[in-house]
Image (cartoon, grey):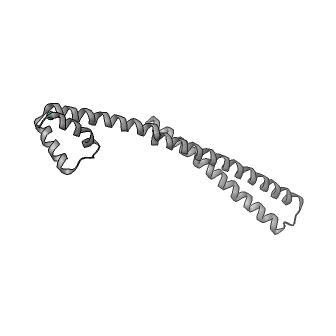
Amino acid sequence: MSCEKYEQMISPYVDDELSDKEKEELEQHIKDCDKCREELQAITFMRNIMSNSEQKLVTPPSKMKRRIYHHIYRDLLIMFAGLVIIISMVSISGGLAQLLLFSRIPVGVRTLFIAGIILLICGLIVLLYDIFIDMFKILKKNK
Ligand SMILES: [Zn+2]
């Protein structure tokens, strides 16, 4: 059989569109034919490059995606920490003012005071956690 017939089968072979019998036939021919083997390698090579570049265009590399997500996460964390600290400062100063102004401390004020301290501690933990992550990353990078 002539090479012409097999050359037309190479592209469908790479795309996995041949029947098992045709596949077998082509594989058999390629074993003995340098020209068709080279053709197959060239087409396979081209297809790989094309599919790789398509993937690069459609989806950003996972590393980049992770970096974007990390930035968003970090910004939200810092905003949250700031908010928590502001709220806790207000409630603590309010609680302190009440404590200084009145010798008898109402239950509501005491609760507010304790809640303020808890919020402040939570805020500091969140902030420290973020700073520690950054420090850890810098240390890892320098290694
Ligand atoms: Zn051939």
Q: Is residue 111 above or below residue 65?
A: below
Q: Nearer the viewer, residue 40 or 105?
A: 40
Measured as percent of width and height from the top left, residue 90 is found at: 79, 53
Q: Is residue 117 above or below residue 42?
A: below
Quarter of the figure that contains the C terminus? top left
In this rendering, the count of numbered labels is 0
Measured as percent of width and height from the top left, residue 55 is found at: 41, 40
Q: Residue at x 27, y 46 (%)?
A: 17
Query: Is residue 131 left or right of 54 when viewed as pictured?
Result: right
Quarter of the figure that contains the N terminus? top left
Q: Residue at x 81, y 64 (%)?
A: 109
Measured as percent of width and height from the top left, residue 100 is found at: 86, 57
Q: Nearer the viewer, residue 64 or 6?
A: 6
Query: Is residue 89 left or right of 53 when viewed as pictured?
Result: right
Q: Quadrant of residue 14?
A: top left
Q: Of all residues shown, which one is farthest toward the right?
A: 101
Measured as percent of width and height from the top left, residue 59 is found at: 46, 41
Q: Residue at x 54, y 41 (%)?
A: 68
Query: Is residue 4 left or right of 97 when viewed as pictured?
Result: left
- Quadrant observed for ligand 1 in the rendered image: top left
Q: Is residue 17 above or below residue 10?
A: below
Q: Of all residues shown, which one is farthest toward the bottom?
A: 107
